[in-house]
Amino acid sequence: MFRIAFMAAVTVIAATLPLKNSRADALVVDLSNHLVAITTGFTGTDVLLFGAVQNEGDIIVTVRGPDQDMVVRRKERTVGIWVNRESATFKNVPTYYASASNRPMDIIANDNVLRDYRIGLEHQRFIAATDITEVDQKAYRDALVRNMQNVGLFNQRPAKISFLSNQLFRTDIHFPANTPTGTYMINVYLIRDGRIASVKTTPLVVSKTGVSAEVYDFAHRYSALYGIIAVIIAVFSGWVASVVFRKG
């Protein structure tokens, strides 16, 4: 059923494309869902991005989550124990970053184009707020990228974009269970002869819903009270467990 609906949607897009824009760089994109609802027991999900182009070309997709400051700490072994030493703070780091392309990006466009449009992890501008040397900044930046990749919030390599015909294309965007909430910006680039011919941007919202949203909101509004309740629940649970084991 979903495949039928998808094919119907992209067929309509392809049919209306010449009517919307007769230019050779016409590009139309959409998502199967513009809301990722995080409920209790959320284990991750995929969102389908699909679209159509007027004429043949290469497609690159980037997905950037909300920005926030991030701290990277360097650990050193002291007397057999790993402890945090120096640290570096980076400003405006995306909490999520993913990309996709129909061919390798370095074949689609040269490094200057990719850098100018900030396409790819290596071209994201993580600005260090800490006064450190360029060598240390690179080391901390590399560590930040590795950490985010390890928890699944930066993709290791671009996902695959599939062309269903000369005009229609699709790709899946994966959002893991630990996906941060907020508004995500999805950029779709149409590239011809190594140059950006057209860019379309569409937002996607990741939001907590249901009971998990109420608990999350309560924890942030009344953090002190939430902490007290959590301690009480933990103590009570421990007491119940001790009683059960004692009877056993």
Image: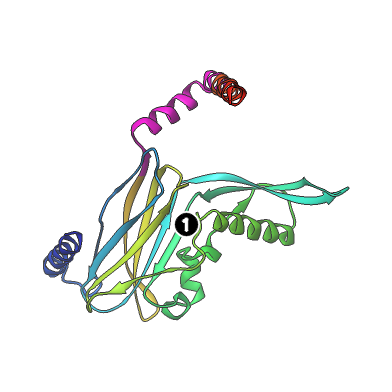
Percent position of residue 51, x then y: 24, 65
Can you name the residue that lies furthest to the right here? 79
Q: At label 1, which amino acid type do we have?
A: Tyr
Q: Secondary structure at mark 1?
A: strand
The quadrant holding residue 105 is bottom left
Residue beneath the point at 37% across and 59% down: 173
Q: Is residue 179 above or below residue 166?
A: above
Q: Is residue 85 above or below residue 7?
A: above
Q: Where residue 224 appears, x then y in whole percent?
A: 56, 20
Q: What's drawn in magenta, residue-wise?
A: 206-229
Q: Give the left or right position of residue 107, taking residue 242 as reference.
A: left
Camera-nearest residue between 215 and 146: 215
Residue receiving disc 1: 97
User: Which quarter of the rendered picture does the N terminus lie within?
Assistant: bottom left
Camera-side residue of 107 and 206: 206
The x, y position of residue 37, in whole percent, is 33, 42
Q: Nearer the viewer, residue 24 or 236?
A: 236
For image coordinates 68% across by 56% down, the residue present is 140
Quadrant where the C terminus sits is top right
